[in-house]
Amino acid sequence: MAGRMGWTGNFCWLASRAAAMALALSLTGCLGLSSEDGGVSADQLAAANAVPQGKIDPNEVAIAEREHPKIVAAFGGTYEDREAELAIASVVGRLVAASPEPWRSYRVTILNSPAVNAFALPGGYVYVTRGLLALASDTAEVAAVISHEMAHVTARHAFLRAQKAEAAAVASQAVQDVVQDPAVQRVALASTQVSLARFSQIQELEADRIGIATLAKAGFDPFASPRFLTSMSRLAAWKNGLPEDDTGSIDFLSSHPSTPERLTQAQEVAKATGVTDGEVDHDGYLSRIDGIMYGDDPNEGYVRGRQFLHAKLGFAFEVPEGFLIDNTSKAVLATNADGVAMRFDGANIPAGGDLVGYLTSGWVNGLDQQSVRTVSIAGLPAAVASASARGFTYRIAVIRFADQAFRFLFATRGDAAALEQTFSSTVASFRSLSEAEKASLAPLRIRVVTVGTGDTAETLTRRMVPMDRGIILFRALNGLAASEEPRPGTRVKIIVDR
């Protein structure tokens, strides 16, 4: 969550773990939507939109130049790391030369986001997150991601579909369900409508096919693509609280084609290339990402277990057991398996403004006027309220902290009594951080270590910062299957805070 004043946030609700994760990733790129192409193949559509060889459509460049600053801002800025940049630079030239349009130039940007994500805009603008670089285990896997995004560009996929973001549509409907004031609606929805290239399932699979062929032609291991897809699914299982390798029902990033389908095709396409000795570069890649930031940026605050702590703003709170926290640039989101959703963000209230007046100003649909009251939370002035709309029960708290105001928004379709208990315990945990606590907080980083004799996944996990089901995360980060042990002498990634 960004550390600056004047936030408005979105009053949007998703009352299941899967839905809340979709909101947490509301600006993800390269996502598939349901096919609306009427049986026309991606190759046919791409051919119809092709431009002459060596020519760049000025419309492509105009789109990219318009959207680029929005994307950078939405994903927390760019991530500056010389070695990470070299890890990408080492593959781009080879991929371009092997691509269907070797005359095209590309601009690759590393985004300062912990999410595992990559996407492309027309005009050759390609984006990867530092979270993706941290998950990848070798140069070939990064090359596989970039070649996939290049395929979207060369196939003109962005021009074959309306650039309507699925997550933005979900958020739009949720805002409209609760917020009455049109002006507030416009402000709330604006943050969800960064225009990214979103592709159909057919186009995603087509980009996989083209990308793997390009990967092999460039001399990289074509099996890096299914290998990375597998790591993505394992990470998704960890995030969703599923047993290790229980990934068959997960569609990673919600609207991609299902991971099993993509994985099956990727394996088949990789095998069909006939390349069995492509470059992998495991050790070289790990050396370049050793020390890369993992998880939250200091400007966004930190998630540590069930706690959210923001050293720069000086506060912390804790969610109850069973909740998963996701920290985004716009808000802190949390959900549990019972369908309770939480959003914590900034409230746009001037210094000295009336908290009760804010709650009753008309932005909450279904507000119970009798429930609005002032309270004290950790000695801080606050106001709380209840609301109900379209089958949801809501609890809301607004807290004055220094010269800013923050709000907790809870919702459920389930047990209202359970919601009240969750709301009360979370809000009551809001507190100021001591100077010692602020000084002790540091960003997590990837460190590369060599597996020693006697080391196991469990012993290496114990060297990481404590995390829920950390051994599953360790294996996902290192491309290990359930119960698989790292081999002595190999290098692996661990997550540390020093």
Image (cartoon, rainbow, N blue to C red):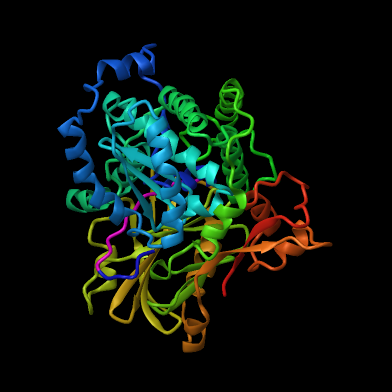
Residue 139, given in percent of the width and then of the height, sits at: 53, 46
Question: How many marks overall?
Answer: 0
Q: Is residue 28 above or below residue 493?
A: above
- State the residue lying farthest toward the bottom: 435
- Nearer to the camera, 364 or 162: 162
The reply to whether residue 179 is in sight is no
Residue 355 shown left or right of residue 320 in the figure: left
As for residue 325 lying within the magenta part, the answer is no
As for residue 14 lying within the magenta part, the answer is yes
Residue 146, given in percent of the width and then of the height, sits at: 43, 40
Residue 243 shown left or right of residue 403 in the figure: right
Give the residue at x 62% y 57%.
322
Q: Which residues are magenta?
A: 6-15
- Nearer to the camera, 395 or 458: 458
Q: Quadrant of the C terminus?
A: bottom right
Give the residue at x 20% y 31%.
56
Give the residue at x 52% y 30%.
216
Q: Quadrant of the N terminus?
A: bottom left
Give the residue at x 61% y 53%.
283
Residue 410 shown left or right of residue 448 in the figure: left
Residue 78, given in percent of the width and then of the height, sits at: 34, 58
- Nearer to the camera, 419 or 450: 450
Q: Is residue 271 above or below residue 92?
A: above
Residue 493 shown left or right of residue 9 in the figure: right
Residue 309, given in percent of the width and then of the height, sits at: 48, 73
Q: Is residue 340 above or below residue 320?
A: above
Q: Is residue 172 above or below residue 98?
A: below
Which quadrant holds residue 161? Answer: top left
The reply to whether residue 277 is in sight is yes
- Nearer to the camera, 59 or 191: 59
SS assignment for the magenta stretch, majority: loop
